[in-house]
Image: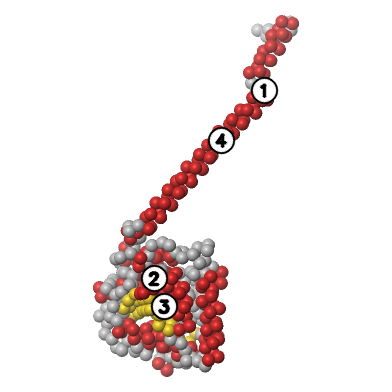
């Protein structure tokens, strides 16, 4: 069948023009109407986005309020509950006599003793020392700190002595803390005290080591965590033995940074027997390289003090205290933008046991 011929009459041409005009009219709007429509749609979008932002802001404020209430309430202790994985607990058997200890005695390490005989104790050849530590009676001060710590531990049966210090020297295969313990045993500073513990801490059951600290702040914080590892609790009082020139650093800055009660913190300062010029030089060094930097960076996690930690960790060692002392996780990770901002989270010594 042949197709019908196209309409070419005037009537058909008129009808076709009419249909085209109607079609264009049905699919187009005046310019003013189009602008009004777009403005309406944009207004709806703005209102929707504003509503969503308000809802998010309200939800965030509600979350922060509830979190603050939880942390500041008396239920904070339950909030901090954490179960150590059984696979870890299975490898450690805590002696019952250790669970009643409540006095932490800390002796921070300053160098590494590499000797193993009594005649090696005061010989610089058997110490891994920084240049500024050579001469000036520093080694005698180290030994006096160790003696004092051991004496205090023997006197108080409710105490745990912790030698604290990491593997800070590239040429040493041991830690500051382990070398201090070895020196104490070499000199028999525990007086042949019998050990009733099977915890394998040392021949003297109430002395152990903390082998990860890289600076004085970590000496204090990590020793608190190590005390918990050994005893299953946190101390009610602390005695720290160190240089007299570092008293202000520990009492005014480190103790305040961990918020340990001032009435339960004691510092015993023992200085090396040096001539006045050496003593003045040492005090100046402590102020400019120790005390003053910590006044600007309480937790030692920024710039200058962080660089010192990195330099003292040549073997890239990491501490285990997030797991073994979970109540301190917030404090262990605290590094505020304002380096002088005090940690405000709950801590074990804030709450009654």
Residue furthest to the bottom in view is 119
* Cα distance between the residues tagged 1 and 2: 76 Å
Q: Quadrant of the N terminus?
A: top right
Tell me which numbered mark, 3 or 2, is placed earlier along the sequence.
3
In this view, the mark in front (3 or 2): 2
Residue located 55% across and 82% down the image = 285
Tell me which numbered mark, 1 or 2, is placed earlier along the sequence.
1
Image quadrant in which you'd find residue 77 = bottom left
Q: Which mark is residue 260?
A: 2
Around disc 4, counting alpha carbons within 10 Å, would you say few (fewer than 14), some (14 to 19), or many (20 or more)?
A: few
Around disc 1, counting alpha carbons within 10 Å, would you say few (fewer than 14), some (14 to 19), or many (20 or more)?
A: few
Question: Is label 2 in a helix, a strand or a loop?
Answer: loop
* Cα distance between the residues tagged 3 and 2: 18 Å
Question: Is label 1 in a helix, a strand or a loop?
Answer: loop
Where is residue 4? Give x, y as percent.
68, 7
Q: Is residue 309 left or right of residue 239?
A: right
Where is residue 244? Give x, y as percent.
45, 84
Q: Which mark is residue 30?
A: 1
Tell me which numbered mark, 1 or 3, is placed earlier along the sequence.
1
Mark 4 lies on residue: 45
* Cα distance between the residues tagged 4 and 2: 54 Å
Tell me which numbered mark, 4 or 3, is placed earlier along the sequence.
4
Residue located 49% across and 64% down the image = 341
| Residue toward you, 171 or 346 | 346
Q: Which mark is residue 164?
A: 3
């Amino acid at each position: 069948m042949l197709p019908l011929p196209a309409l070419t009459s005037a009537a058909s041409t008129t009808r076709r023009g009419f249909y085209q005009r109607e079609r264009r009219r049905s699919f187009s709007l005046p310019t003013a109407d189009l602008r009004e429509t777009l403005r309406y749609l944009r207004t709806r979008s703005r209102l929707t986005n504003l509503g969503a932002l308000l809802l998010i802001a309200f939800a965030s404020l509600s979350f922060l309020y509830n979190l603050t209430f939880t942390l500041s309430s008396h239920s904070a202790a339950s909030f901090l509950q954490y179960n150590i994985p059984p696979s870890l607990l299975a490898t450690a058997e805590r002696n019952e006599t250790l669970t009643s200890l409540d006095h932490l005695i800390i002796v921070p390490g300053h160098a590494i003793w590499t000797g193993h005989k009594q005649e090696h104790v005061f010989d610089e050849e058997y110490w891994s020392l920084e240049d500024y530590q050579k001469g000036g009676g520093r080694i005698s001060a180290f030994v006096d700190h160790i003696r004092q710590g051991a004496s205090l531990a023997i006197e108080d049966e409710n105490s745990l002595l912790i030698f604290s210090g990491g593997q800070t020297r590239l040429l040493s295969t041991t830690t500051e803390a382990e070398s201090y313990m070895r020196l104490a045993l070499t000199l028999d500073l525990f007086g042949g005290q019998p050990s009733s513990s099977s915890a394998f801490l040392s021949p003297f059951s109430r002395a152990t080591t903390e082998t990860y600290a890289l600076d004085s702040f970590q000496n204090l914080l990590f020793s608190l965590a190590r005390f918990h590892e050994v005893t299953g609790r946190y101390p009610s009082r602390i005695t720290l033995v160190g240089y007299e020139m570092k008293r202000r650093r520990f009492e005014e800055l480190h103790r305040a940074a961990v918020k340990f009660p001032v009435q339960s913190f004691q510092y015993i300062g023992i200085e090396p027997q040096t001539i006045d010029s050496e003593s003045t030089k040492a005090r100046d060094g402590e102020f400019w390289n120790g005390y003053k930097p910590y006044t600007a960076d309480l937790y030692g996690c920024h710039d200058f003090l962080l660089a010192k930690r990195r330099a003292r960790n040549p073997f890239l060692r990491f501490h285990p205290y997030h797991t073994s002392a979970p109540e301190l996780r917030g404090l262990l990770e605290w590094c505020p933008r304002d380096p002088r901002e005090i940690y405000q989270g709950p801590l074990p010594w804030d709450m009654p046991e």
